[in-house]
Image (cartoon, rainbow, N blue to C red):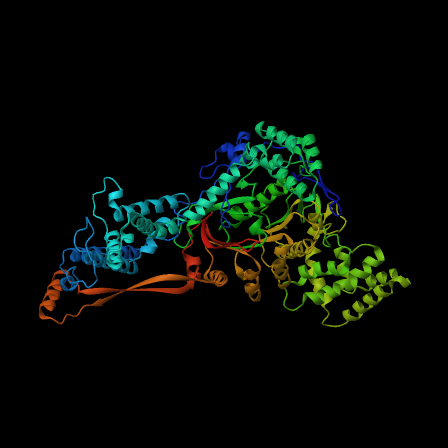
Amino acid sequence: MDSDGTQDARGTHANPVPRPAGPPDVPSVPPRPGRVPGPVERGVPARASVAEWLNEPRPEAEPGIWRYGYRLPKGAQAAERLSPVTVVGILVPLVVGLFLWSLWRRGAMPYQSVLLKVFTPEDWWWPGTVSPKGWEGSAAVLVYNGVFFLVLLYAMGRLGSWPDIARHFVARRPQPARALLALLGALVTLSFVFPHAFPGVGWDALPIVDAVFALVALISGGFDVFGSTAFKFGLYTVITLLVVWPFARIGGWWSYAKERLAARKAAAGPTGPAPADRPREQWPDLREAGQYEAAEVLTAEVIGGRMNDVDCARVEHAWAVARRDGSLAGFRDTVLRQGAAAWSHPSGARDLARRTAQHDLSVGQVRIGRWVAAERAPLVYHGAGAALGPAVLGTSLLAVGPSGAGKTRQLVEPVTEALALRALTGQCAFVAVSAPGTPVAADSAFDVVVRIGDRDSVHDLDPYADSDDPDEAAAFLAEALVGDLDTVGTESAATALAQVLGPYRAAHGRFPALPVLRELLESDPAALTALRDALAGDEFTVMRRELDVRIRQSASPADVGRVVADRLALLNRPVFDGFFGGGGAARPFSLRALTQHPLRVRVDLPEHGHEEAARLITRLVLAQFSAVVRDGRRAHFACLVLDDATGTVTAGSVRRIQRMRSQNAGVVLALRTIGDVPEALHGPLYGAVGCRMAFSGVTTWDGGRFAQAWGTAWVETRDVAKHTVFADQPMTRAIHALRKLVTGKAVTTDAVTVRTVERERWSASELAHEVPPGHAVLSLTTVEGEHAPPLLVDLRG
C-alpha cells in the first residue's frame, strides 16, 4: 500500500494489476433489518452471523424494496379497504330483505291473501295435489314461499355489494386460508338449507328444499318415481352442489387440490432431503450438481467463521460463471486449493476497512432509507426498506437537490460503497468523480485514486483513454472542451482535433501532450512546420493532406481550432503541469482498464478556483466512460458516479446515457438544480434516465420538471356540497326555523359526488413544500422494465 493510502495499479494502460492490499479484513455482514446496529456492526460485524445472513430469505419483491428479511405486509393481498358506502350497500339490502320476508311469513302483505285464495289445494286444477307428509301448509304455499325467497335473495345480492365483501375477505387471501374460509361459509349456508343434518342447530330451514319438493310434487301429479327415496336423495345432492358451487369458486378448491396433489406426487418420488431443502450455508446448488467436496469445504469455511459476505457472494458468482462456461472441474480445484480466498480481487482485499451503510451482497443491494407509508404508496412498500442495486442503477439515476440536502452523504457515498464491495466480488467496475474538495469514501476503498493537480498523486488521467484511433480520441476531447458551448459544434471541433491528432500519431507513434496539442490548434508556425517535416515520406500522403487542410482552415477568422485551443488552455495552467500525459511522475491511468478488470477508481477534481477546469475534466471522464463501456467483451457491470454533474450534461452525453442500459452500465448524476443543465436538454435527460430522485428543498421550477417526467395517474375524488333545504309545508318550515334558531345554522343536506380524475403523481408545489427534511421522492425502473412509482422515502430511516 502506498503512503497516500491508495492501492496501486501498475500498467493501467493495458493490463492493470492492483497491488495487494494486505491481509483480508474481518468478515462482515449486514445487520438485521428493523434493529439499530451496535458499535461493532457499524464497523465490522461478527463472523458468526454469516450463516444467518446466508439463510435469511429474500423473497421476490417490487423494485427498490430491501429484500433482506423482507416480509409481505399483513393485508397486502387486499390492497383496498371496504369503504363505508360498500358496507352500507351490504347491510341495507339485508335488513330490507329480512323485513320483507318477515312480512311475507306473517301474511301481512295485501297481495299474498289474494294469491292464497286463488291458489289453494282445493281449487288447484292440477290432479293429485296432496301435501307431502310432514310439510306444514299446502304445496302451493311452499312453492310461493320458495320462489319469493329466491327472488328476494337475488334482489338483495344485486342491490348489495356482496361480491365485494366476498373478494375482500375470502378471494384475496392466500391458500389454505382462502379454501378454509370458503368451506366455513359453505357449511353455514348448508346449515340453513338442511338444519336437520346439523345437530344442535335450532333455526328453521330456508324455504328452498321444501319448495323444490313441493314443485316436483305439483309437476309429477302423483307419479311414484318422483316420490322414491333415490329421487329424494338425488335431489338433495343437486341442491347441495348448487349451494356449494359458488363457495368452491371463491375458495379456489380445484386449483388448490391440484397443487396439493402435485406436491404429494413430488414428495413420493426420491427419498431423502432434497438439495433445495438444505440451508444456504451448506451450498445446496453445489451438492445438486455433484460438487460435494467443494460444498463441504465451503460449509466448513462458513461455520468456522473464515468467510464473510463478500467471500460468499464472490464464490456464488464464480459458481454461476463456471456453470455457464462448463468449467466445473476448474471450480472444484480452485475451491479445494484456496477455500474462502478463491477468486479474490486482484488487490487481495476481501472487505472494506469500514462500512457506513447496510449491504446485502447476495442480491447486490444497498439500503438508503425506508419507504414512507403514505396514502399514495402501494401497501407492499409500507414500512419496507428502500434499496438500490445493479438492476436499477443499470438504467442510470438522476438526483436533484440543493446543497445540504444529503445527496453525497445519503446517496452517493452508500452507492459508491456498494459498488466497491461488489467490485471485490468480481461483478462490478466503477469510477467515482468527487466534487472539488470533498472526496467520496476513504482511499483504502479504491484501487486507483487520481488527484488532478496534486503533486503527490500516484496516478494521472490519460486524456486519450489509451485509444489508438484519432477520431475516437478527438471525439473525447471535443465533448469535453466544447460540449457545453452553443457557438461551436462538437462535430466540427472533433474534425479540427482529428486533423492534428492523426498526423501527429502517424509521425511519432503516440498522441501529443496537451501543451503541444494547443500549439498545433493555435497554428503555431514552428509546431506545424516540424510536424509537416516529420511526414515527409510517401506513406504519410494522407496525413499530410489532413494537416494541410488544418493549415488552410486556421487562416479563416471563424476557425474552430482557436476556440478549442482557448478551452484547452484551462488545462494548461501551472497547477496541472505534468498531468494529462505531460510527463510528470504520476502514471497515466486509462478508463479502458475498466473493461478488463473489476477496478475501483476515484477521480478527485481540483480544489476551488478551477471550477471550469473541473467541469471540463468531468465531461472528459463521462465521454471516455460512455465510449469504453461499448466493449461487448465485458461481463461485469460498469458504473460512473458523479458527485457534482454541474455543466456535464450535453446533447451527446444524453444520447450515450440512454444507450448504456443495453451495455450493462449506468451513470449516477447528482445536481444541485436542473438549471445546471441547458434548458433544451431537460426533457431528453429525464427521458434518458430510468431512476429519478428529488430531494427535500427543490424549487418549484425543478419540481415542475419532475412532475412532467412522472406524469399523471387516475385517482378517485369525493366532492361534498351542502345544499340548503327549502320546505314547502308550513309545519316543516316552522321546524326548520326553530332548528336554525337553536343551532344558528340553516338546515342543509350533503350532496356527495364521486369522480375519477387524472392528476399529477407529484405536483411541483408538493415537491417544493411538502417533502420533509431528510426525505426524497424516488422513482425506479429496472433494466427488465419493471417500474416503481414516485414514492416518498425517509433517508434517515
Percent of width and height locating residue 766 = 41, 58
**In the picture, residue 659 is in which quadrant?**
bottom right
Residue 546 or residue 633, whichever sits in front: 633
Q: Is residue 623 above or below residue 495?
A: above
Q: Is residue 97 above or below residue 439?
A: below
Q: Residue at x 25, y 48 (%)?
A: 192
Q: Residue at x 23, y 59 (%)?
A: 148
Q: Is residue 590 above or below residue 531?
A: above
Percent of width and height locating residue 770 = 40, 55
Q: Is residue 246 left or right of residue 555?
A: left
**In the picture, residue 383 is in which quadrant?**
top left
- Pick the quarter of the image with the N terminus: top right
Q: Is residue 89 above or below residue 439?
A: below
Res 23 visible: no
Percent of width and height locating residue 796 = 46, 45
Q: Is residue 528 left or right of residue 662?
A: right
Q: Is residue 539 left or right of residue 561?
A: right
Residue 706 or residue 476, whichever sits in front: 706
Res 430 visible: yes
